[in-house]
Image (spheres, rainbow, N blue to C red):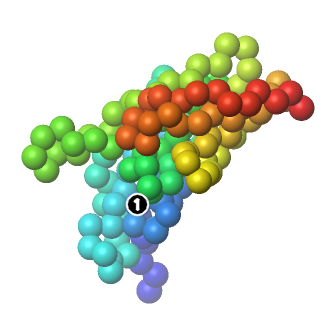
Amino acid sequence: MEKPLVMLDKGTNCSSWNYCGQRLATGLLDGTLVIFDSLEPDSSTFTCTSRTKAHGASITKVIWVPPEYGDAVACICADGTLLLWEEVEEGPQLLKWKLCKLFESNATQVLDVQFGISLTSLKMVVAYSDGHVKVYELLDPLLLNKWQLQVNHVN
């Protein structure tokens, strides 16, 4: 008999596994970000460990930041907003997801985001609905809210 890995919420719109398959991030139509964890390393059962109202618009895509830069996810929302959420310690043995960066888009929508590691830093490539592709570089590896625009390419 098949055993489900995880029971997703009604309204789940997108999902993404972290690099090692031990965590699952899901985005809901109501803008909620949900994180599931495998509490036992060898277990194939996942438990909801966090539920955060990330945005007012629905989340259309979630992607994990490379693990070298902590536990963080990027969320693309239906209104074109790009959000970076990071898991931080809020006290002894208390972890909480915190919004660390908001990339608002005035007239265009974010269609996709990808991360890449260069020799010196983390890069983030963002594709927009107007044909622009922007490359950002993380200025401080310990602060996911400090990004600098490196390239703005019009396709």
**Residue found at the far right of this picture:** 155
Considering every residue shown, the one lying at the far left of the view is: 92
Q: Does residue 79 appear left or right of residue 99 in this picture?
A: right
Taking 21 as reference, is 11 above or below it?
above
For residue 20, side relative to residue 58 (left or right): left
Residue 102 can be seen, yes or no: yes
Q: Quadrant of residue 106?
A: top right
Towards the viewer: 123 or 34: 123
Q: Quadrant of the C terminus?
A: top right
Residue beneath disc 1: 23
Residue in the picture at 39% in, 50% down: 70
Position in image of residue 110 (x %, y %): 68, 30
Rendering coords of residue 129 (x, y %): 79, 28
Q: Is residue 15 visible?
A: no
- Front residue of 38/71: it is 71
Image quarter where the N terminus lies is bottom left
Query: For the residue carrying disc 1, how many other residues have a C-alpha within 10 Å: few (<14), some (14-19), or many (20+)?
Result: many
| Residue depicted at 32% across the width and 39% down the height | 97
Figure check: 118 above or below 33: below
Q: Residue 67: percent from the left, percent from the top? A: 44, 56
Q: Amino acid at mark 1?
A: Arg
Count of marks placed on residues: 1
* Quarter of the rendering containing residue 150: top right
Residue at image coords 82%, 24% = 130
Rendered location of residue 59, percent (x, y): 55, 36
Q: Secondary structure at mark 1?
A: strand
Residue at the outermost bottom position: 1
Write the residue at 49% across / 63% down.
19
**31 up-or-down from 6: above or below:** above
Towards the viewer: 141 or 124: 141
Nearer-the-camera pick, 64 or 49? 64
